[in-house]
Structures are given as structure tokens and as C-alpha cells.
């Protein structure tokens, strides 16, 4: 089974592209979805112990948690040390299930693939990208997003130009949905045939 890593900076269209792979019949593991599940499960008591007051109604309140870690590198490292191993175990179980089922290709949607050393976990990498103006519009349209939050997020991500340089495949989501869907189909065909 070929493992394809899907990544891209914030606002580049990674989640939409992941859905396109799923629509093309490729199993997709979404790290953000895994975090949401873990925040309501295994990770909840661990995160609450590290960041008291973040557990509400049996799940971690992401808005409350961001108050504890945004702009605080040590706190963020602590959170990542709790969450990243759990997400990785979730992804490993996903890959094992699909390997057993005989899937020829699976996608790991990893927002911080290059930042977290995830390159060695995948066979090929596809990077979603778009022009900086498009990225900025998309991100600032999100509820609760501010210029300061956007700048803080970008500061901890590998620059888009570097991600593009390190990619095996590129999908420019700024060219529209049909173009992105065609790029996804071309990648699937290239990796596993048509």
C-alpha cells in the first residue's frame, strides 16, 4: 500500500482536497478529525491535567485551550507532547486496517507534516497551495480569526515555498474546484493506475 501524505499551510484548501481524495475512493485519515475525537476521548483527561479548566462537558474546549497555548511556545510543546503520539497511534491503526483490507493507496492528512517530521512516515507528499492573497482571505474569513492569530500560526509553519519545493505533487487550490479534482484524479492514476 502506498501512503500519501497530504499537507499544506493554513487556508490552502487541504481539508477540501482531502474530501476529494475520499470521493475518489481513497481512504483518508484526517489528523484534525483525530484530534477532535481524542479531545473528547483519550486525550481529554491528559490535556485537562496539563491545562486545568480546559475540559468542559466531557471534552476539551478548543477556545479555552488556545488561551493556554497561543503565543506560549513551552505550553504548545507540552500540548504537542500529549497529543501528537495519540494522533500518530490513531493514524497507524488506520493504516493497518486499510493494509489488511488490501487498499492500494491511503492518504494521511497531516497539517504539520514537515514541521513534525512526518515525511518519513509517507511514501509521497502532495502539497496544497494557493496564492498568498487567496490564503489570507480564506483564513481571515474564519470565525474568531484575527491578524495576530494568523501571523502566529504562519510563524510556526514551514513556508509555503519550502513545502512546494519538498513536494512530490502540487495541487493549486486557487485554480478552482474542478482543477483541484482533476489534479487529485491524476495523482491517484499516477500512483495506482486508472
Image (spheres, rainbow, N blue to C red):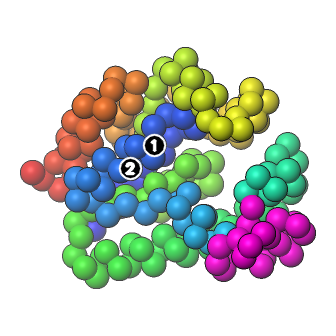
Q: Residue at x 54, y 34 (%)?
A: 11
Give residue 123's position: percent from left, percent from top.
Answer: 37, 57
In the displayed structure, 34 sits above or below 124; it is below
Q: How many other residues sit within 10 Å of disc 1, few (<14), some (14-19) or many (≥20)?
A: many
Based on the picture, tell me whether residue 45 belongs to the magenta stretch.
yes
Based on the picture, tell me whether residue 88 belongs to the magenta stretch.
no
Per the rendered image, the range of residues in magenta is: 40-61
Residue nearer the viewer, 100 or 149:
149
Q: Which residue lies furthest to the front in this view?
A: 57
Relative placement, left or right, of 92 versus 142 is left
- Whole-Å distance between the Cαs marked 2 and 1? 6 Å
Name the image quarter holding the N terminus. bottom left
Q: Residue at x 45, y 46 (%)?
A: 15
**What residue is shown with label 1?**
14
Relative placement, left or right, of 38 versus 148 is left
**What residue is shown with label 2?**
18
Callout 2 touching callout 1 (CB < 8 Å)? yes
In the displayed structure, 50 sits above or below 24; it is below
Q: In which quarter of the image is residue 54?
A: bottom right
Give residue 4's position: percent from left, percent from top.
Answer: 36, 55
Relative placement, left or right, of 143 versus 21 is right
Q: Residue at x 31, y 32 (%)?
A: 177
Q: Quadrant of residue 106?
A: bottom left
Residue nearer the viewer, 2 or 56:
56
Q: Count up the numbered dots.
A: 2
Give residue 56's position: percent from left, percent from top.
Answer: 78, 69
The reply to whether residue 21 is in sight is yes
Relative placement, left or right, of 34 versus 23 is right
Under circle 2, the secondary element is: helix
Under circle 1, the secondary element is: helix
Q: Residue at x 81, y 56 (%)?
A: 64
Amino acid at each position: 500500500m502506498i501512503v500519501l501524505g497530504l499537507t499544506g499551510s493554513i487556508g490552502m484548501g487541504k481539508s477540501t482536497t482531502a474530501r476529494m481524495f475520499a470521493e475518489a475512493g481513497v481512504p483518508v485519515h484526517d489528523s484534525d478529525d483525530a484530534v477532535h475525537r481524542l479531545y473528547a476521548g483519550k486525550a481529554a483527561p491528559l490535556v485537562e491535567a496539563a491545562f486545568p479548566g480546559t475540559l468542559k462537558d466531557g471534552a476539551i474546549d478548543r477556545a479555552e485551550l488556545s488561551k493556554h497555548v497561543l503565543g506560549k511556545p513551552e505550553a504548545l510543546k507540552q500540548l504537542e507532547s500529549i497529543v501528537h503520539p495519540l494522533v500518530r497511534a490513531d493514524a497507524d491503526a488506520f493504516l493497518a486496517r486499510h493494509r489488511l483490507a488490501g487498499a492500494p493507496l491511503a492518504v494521511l492528512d497531516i497539517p504539520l507534516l514537515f514541521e513534525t517530521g512526518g515525511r518519513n512516515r509517507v511514501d509521497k507528499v502532495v502539497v496544497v497551495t494557493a496564492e498568498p492573497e487567496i490564503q489570507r482571505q480564506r483564513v481571515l474569513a474564519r470565525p474568531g480569526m484575527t491578524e495576530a492569530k494568523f501571523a502566529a500560526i504562519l510563524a510556526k509553519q514551514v513556508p509555503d515555498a519550502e513545502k512546494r519545493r519538498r513536494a512530490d505533487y502540487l495541487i493549486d487550490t486557487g485554480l478552482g474546484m474542478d482543477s483541484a479534482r482533476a489534479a487529485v484524479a491524476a495523482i491517484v492514476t499516477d500512483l495506482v493506475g486508472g
